[in-house]
Image (cartoon, rainbow, N blue to C red):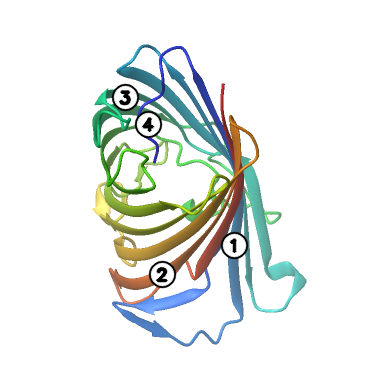
Amino acid sequence: QSGGIADDRWLLSLSLERHEMNDLVSDQDRITDETARRRSSDALLLELGYGLNERWSLTFLSNYIEHRRQIGDSPDSKQSSRGVGDSLLLLKFVPQSLSVLHRHAYGVGLGVKVSSSDDDEFGTNGVRYSQDMQPSSGASGTVIWGYYAHSFSREARNTVHFSVNASFNQSNHIDYKIGDDMSLGLVWQSLINEDWRASLGLNWRESAADERLGVKLPNTGGAWLDVKPSVQYRVSDNFALRLGYTQPLSRDLNGALQFTTSQAWSIGVVGRF
């Protein structure tokens, strides 16, 4: 995640992200799935930020997502839903950014999550899709953000970045509550030449179990550790292209069985103006 934004400058990021969620996991072990189940999602992600002054910035994040699921080979076994997902408005305070004079950067932020109305999708049989197939959670929430970065030289050819996010969710109109979660990110970034930059990140996330009518649901929540390599190519002084990949390293999930992410890809463009 990015730190601060320069005074009176804009940041715009658009990316396409695909998730394959075909791993069947029991606790920490991957189990062979014999149901021919397939689950994936494609999302268009938007990040728009504005620097209010040298220390304060405001960031808006949103997405449009399509879910797909198939169990078995029958045409009737296919399910799909699409719509606007949850959005986030985040106020950041970054008193120090990386520069020729400063090798340390740090900041904190507080955000409000707002849901869209796309949280009541139904199948062709008239049955409401399960919550994981809904584009939006249908509930508001609060996010706390923290950030630290260190540069190993004035030129910032090699930097390390640390971020923390904590999300606290409310219940939606059917009294379903997505579990509160916390994630920690650690990224090493290196400048290869004037145009290319590479990074390698680790992301740990832990989520509480989902709840319905105040009762915790089985086979939801747990902990995930992912590795995230990426490359970035500078098209101009203000725009760059990014390619990223996510591979799970370990999972420790609640309940007897859960389907979870097997891999993910992303491609995007980021601009500052």
Horizontally, residue 62 falls left or right of residue 222, namely right
**Residue type for callout 2:** Pro
State how far apart marks 1 and 3 are (Cα). Answer: 32 Å
**Residue type for callout 3:** Lys
Horizontally, residue 51 falls left or right of residue 163, namely right
**Residue type for callout 1:** Ser
Which residue, given by chain and number where applicable, does mark 4 sit on? 140
Nearest to N terminus: mark 2 or mark 3: 3
State how far apart marks 2 and 3 are (Cα). Answer: 29 Å
Horizontally, residue 43 falls left or right of residue 160, namely right
Secondary structure beneath label 1: strand
Instruction: Evaluate whether residue 130 shows in this view.
Output: no
Q: Looking at the image, which residue is at 42% across and 85% down?
A: 31
Nearest to N terminus: mark 4 or mark 3: 3
Please report contact status of discs 1 and 3: CB closer than 8 Å, yes or no: no
The quarter in which the N terminus is drawn is: top left
Please report contact status of discs 2 and 3: CB closer than 8 Å, yes or no: no
* Residue 248: numbered disc: 2
Nearest to N terminus: mark 2 or mark 1: 1
* Residue 40: numbered disc: 1
Secondary structure beneath label 2: strand
Vertical order, 26 against 5 (above or below):
below
Q: Looking at the image, which residue is at 25% across and 31% down?
A: 102
Select label 4 or label 2 by which is in front: 2
